[in-house]
Image (cartoon, helix red, strand yellow):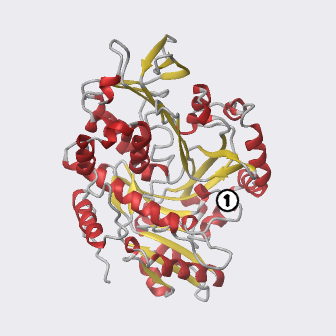
């Protein structure tokens, strides 16, 4: 086992940097798989999950590709590519299974503290967009994971699904929507804090808040020495460990660069900030119960797909619209304006310049978003809520995301809209870069990390048995096994208290 490879007298077996959903998930998986492991968690803020995982900084959508149109691009021949959507949908089912295991084993006591059932809908208008949505629906119907999806162009039915969206709308406007009743709203901040509360009480786990990781050094014996500074006392210390995970959200790129591993060379980051309009009128909030996603504007990043969004945050129902994109050189909401300039190194200048030149429309879009006036934001809101009034809404600052820029032999550098795990060849260190769908697929991302960095352990019978206990579909595909899909969806729906389970009619 991993612990037996350690040198006696050294520091913790594992160091997790960043107290967000990724570190929480990996820490929980490792302690369940290997209870004897010792883990040290370092977070620069004074509380867990205060950056990207926080409810107000995160979309809160259980990203399952039910409603997110950016996961189903239209090809040049007019057909719709559903490959990414199918992959994300199956990964979200894996997350649901792991969360159900956590609830059944009293690791998380109350599922309603972090997950609620909220219908997911896609909504479009105009002949061309309606044609696209119909093609998308028909393509997704070929996959069992989407069999319970409904499609309609009937305005009366749409009024029943999403009254706020339809009230005051031109009756002659061509509209269409899809509806998935089994969608969810997830508070990843609450889930992360619940996991860290549990981990913090486990033997061999230590939590260190207000601690900055300053530097890394690879030792001759294969371990890592990590320089850490207490932000309150200014005290510095060096921690030695066999394995490091960098799960610091936007802060992961600068830390990866400090590790100086060859696999991390050439990566850059493009920061994108966000804002929400938050409804302050209880009557309006009560009229809407859905996550209604539309099509992104031309040149918009995926995180800026507009949605009128029911949220449950700390037991309170909320209604948000956005996000409106923006630009800041910070990599974290609580970061420094020097984050972007300081991330530029000799090995990533070319990829970053190339990606910048290839994404001039994105730059123009972000500049336009930054220059928006309140009237511009209201106009965008009224496309989804025609009767919206300015006095019922207030502006909230959302989280900061850093999109991955990576080397490309053809373009020099490309901007990636997703997540990327970067790990050393020997598996001793790994970093997670990027954003959406991120938190929703954290379990699958961390399972893949285990296969990379804990290859021998994953192949043992003990780990295989435990993995299948935590994720019953582990090693199997739900896409080709409708019976297993229904069985596990029924189980997770019941354990997570999400109401009655929908079953597809074949």
Residue 299, position in %: x, y?
71, 61
Name the residue located 66 percent from the left edge and 45 percent from the top edge.
406
**Residue 350, relative to residue 306: is it above or below?**
above
Q: Can residue 252 be seen in this view?
A: yes
Residue 190, position in %: x, y?
36, 44
Dividing the image into 4 quarters, which one contains the N terminus? top left
Name the residue located 27 percent from the left edge and 33 percent from the top edge.
34
Q: Is residue 110 visible?
A: no
Name the residue located 77 percent from the left edge and 41 percent from the top edge.
350
Residue 468, position in %: x, y?
25, 51
- Dot 1: within a 10 Å radius of its alpha carbon, few (fewer than 14), some, or many (20 or more) residues? many
Judged left or right of residue 355, residue 246 is: left
Name the residue located 51 percent from the left edge and 46 percent from the top edge.
57
Dividing the image into 4 quarters, which one contains the C terminus? bottom left
Which of the 4 image quarters holds residue 10? top left
**Which residue is label 1 attached to?**
300
Residue 311, position in %: x, y?
42, 57
């Amino acid at each position: 086992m991993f612990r037996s490879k350690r040198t006696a007298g050294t520091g913790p077996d594992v160091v997790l940097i960043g107290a967000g959903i990724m570190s929480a998930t990996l820490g929980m998986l490792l302690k369940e798989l290997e209870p004897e492991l010792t883990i040290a968690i370092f977070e620069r803020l004074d509380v867990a999950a205060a950056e990207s995982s926080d409810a107000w900084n995160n979309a809160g959508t259980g990203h399952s590709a039910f409603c997110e149109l950016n996961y189903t691009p239209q090809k040049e021949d007019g057909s719709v590519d559903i490959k990414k959507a199918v992959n994300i949908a199956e990964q979200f089912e894996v997350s649901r299974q792991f969360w159900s295991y956590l609830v059944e084993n009293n690791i998380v006591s109350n599922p309603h503290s972090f997950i609620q059932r909220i219908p997911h809908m896609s909504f479009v208008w105009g002949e061309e967009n309606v044609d696209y949505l119909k093609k998308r629906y028909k393509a997704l119907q070929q996959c069992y994971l989407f069999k319970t999806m409904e499609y309609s162009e009937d305005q009366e039915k749409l009024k029943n699904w999403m009254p706020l969206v339809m009230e005051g709308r031109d009756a002659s406007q061509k509209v269409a929507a899809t509806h998935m009743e089994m969608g969810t709203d997830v508070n990843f901040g609450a889930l992360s804090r619940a996991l860290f509360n549990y981990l913090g009480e486990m033997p061999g786990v230590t939590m260190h808040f207000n601690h900055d990781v300053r530097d890394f050094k690879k030792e001759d014996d294969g371990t890592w020495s990590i320089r850490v500074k207490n932000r309150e006392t200014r005290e510095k210390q060096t921690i030695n460990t066999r394995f490091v995970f960098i799960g610091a959200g936007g802060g992961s790129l600068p830390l990866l660069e400090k590790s100086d591993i060859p696999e991390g060379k050439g990566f850059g980051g493009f920061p994108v900030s966000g804002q929400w309009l938050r409804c302050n009128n209880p009557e309006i909030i009560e009229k809407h119960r859905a996550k209604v996603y539309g099509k992104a504007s031309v040149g918009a990043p995926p995180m800026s797909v507009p949605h009128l969004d029911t949220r449950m945050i700390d037991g309170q129902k909320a209604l948000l619209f956005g996000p409106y994109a923006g630009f800041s050189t910070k990599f974290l909401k609580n970061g420094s304006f020097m984050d972007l300039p300081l991330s530029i190194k000799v090995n990533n200048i070319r990829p970053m310049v190339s990606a910048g030149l290839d994404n001039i429309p994105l730059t123009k879009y972000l500049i336009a978003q930054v220059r928006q006036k309140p009237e511009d934001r209201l106009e965008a809101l009224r496309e989804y809520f025609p009767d919206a009034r300015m006095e019922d809404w207030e502006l909230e600052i959302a989280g900061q995301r850093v999109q991955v820029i990576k080397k490309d032999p053809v373009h020099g550098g490309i901007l990636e809209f997703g997540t990327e795990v970067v790990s050393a060849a020997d598996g001793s260190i790994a970093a997670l870069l990027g954003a959406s769908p991120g938190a929703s697929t954290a379990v699958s991302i961390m399972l893949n990390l285990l296969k990379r960095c804990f290859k021998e352990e994953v192949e043992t019978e003990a780990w295989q048995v435990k993995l299948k206990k935590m994720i019953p579909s582990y090693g199997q595909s739900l896409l080709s096994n409708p019976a297993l899909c229904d069985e596990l969806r029924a189980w997770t729906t019941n354990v997570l208290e999400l109401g009655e389970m929908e079953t597809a009619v074949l």
